Image (cartoon, rainbow, N blue to C red):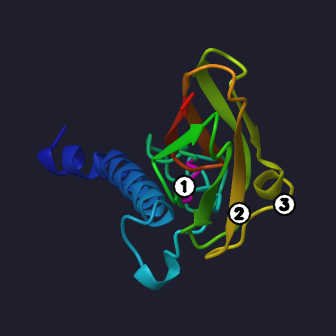
Amino acid sequence: MSPSKSFWSGIPVLAKAIGGIVTGLVGVGSLLVALGVIGNSSSNNNSPTGTTVPSSDTPGAPGNSGGSGGGLTATTTAKASFTVDRSAVTLQALGVKEAKVTVTNQGTTSLKVKAPTLDSSPQGAFVVDASDCTTSAVSPGDSCSLKVTYSGGVQAKATMTVLADNASPVDVDLIGSLA
């Protein structure tokens, strides 16, 4: 076998390997665009969207020449953002037994607030009416109120955790005193 035949017989294998590398790079590039790592920054509006990157490893699809690149599916979702107007609420048995905690949507999409959780000692000393926040989604820039009521029967402490879809929780300390 002459050296020239050996070189030419390796070309199809080399072309297939290069095709696999290119296919893999296209798959990675598509994933980076979908995740917002690269691409037009004006389209990255931080709104919750699901993006699926098509598989480039589909058998028989035009333009696929083999390789292990592709086959990736990614879903990206932007985080929502909200604030509460205070980190602690103090209520008194002989004074103010009710307070409002305002939740403000700082994001760019509607915020679905969930009923807050209470970790209290003793249990039942505080009641939270979240209907203003949980009845409907809170529009960007708008607020809703959580109504906190203290029973006044005993000295109590609690942590109220405010929750919303696709957002980090926020804790508010509740303190109930007898004075």
Instruction: Residue 111: say if magenta.
Output: no
Going from N to C along the chain, the mark reached first, 3 or 1, is 1
Local secondary structure at mark 2: strand
Q: Amino acid at mark 1?
A: Asn
Q: Which residues are magenta?
A: 74-81
Give the CA distance from mark 3 to mark 1: 48 Å
User: Which residue bears the numbered disc 2?
Assistant: 144
Where residue 127 appears, x then y in whole percent? 74, 34
* Residue drawn at (62%, 44%) of the image: 95
Q: Residue at 40%, 49% (x, y): give it.
A: 20
Q: Secondary structure at mark 1?
A: loop
Q: Position of residue 166 (x, y in %)?
A: 60, 49
Residue 154 in sight from this viewpoint: yes
Q: Which residue is mark 3?
A: 136
Cα–Cα span, label 3 and label 2: 10 Å
The answer to which of 136 and 63 lies nearer the viewer is 136
Q: Nearer the viewer, residue 69 or 29?
A: 29
Residue 54 position in % (x across, y down):
61, 55
Which is the main secondary structure of the residues drawn in magenta?
A: loop
The residue lying furthest to the right in this view is: 135
Q: Which mark is residue 64?
A: 1
Residue 129 location (% of width, % of height) = 79, 44
Q: Which mark lies nearer to you, 3 or 1?
A: 3
- Dot 3 or dot 2, earlier in sequence: 3
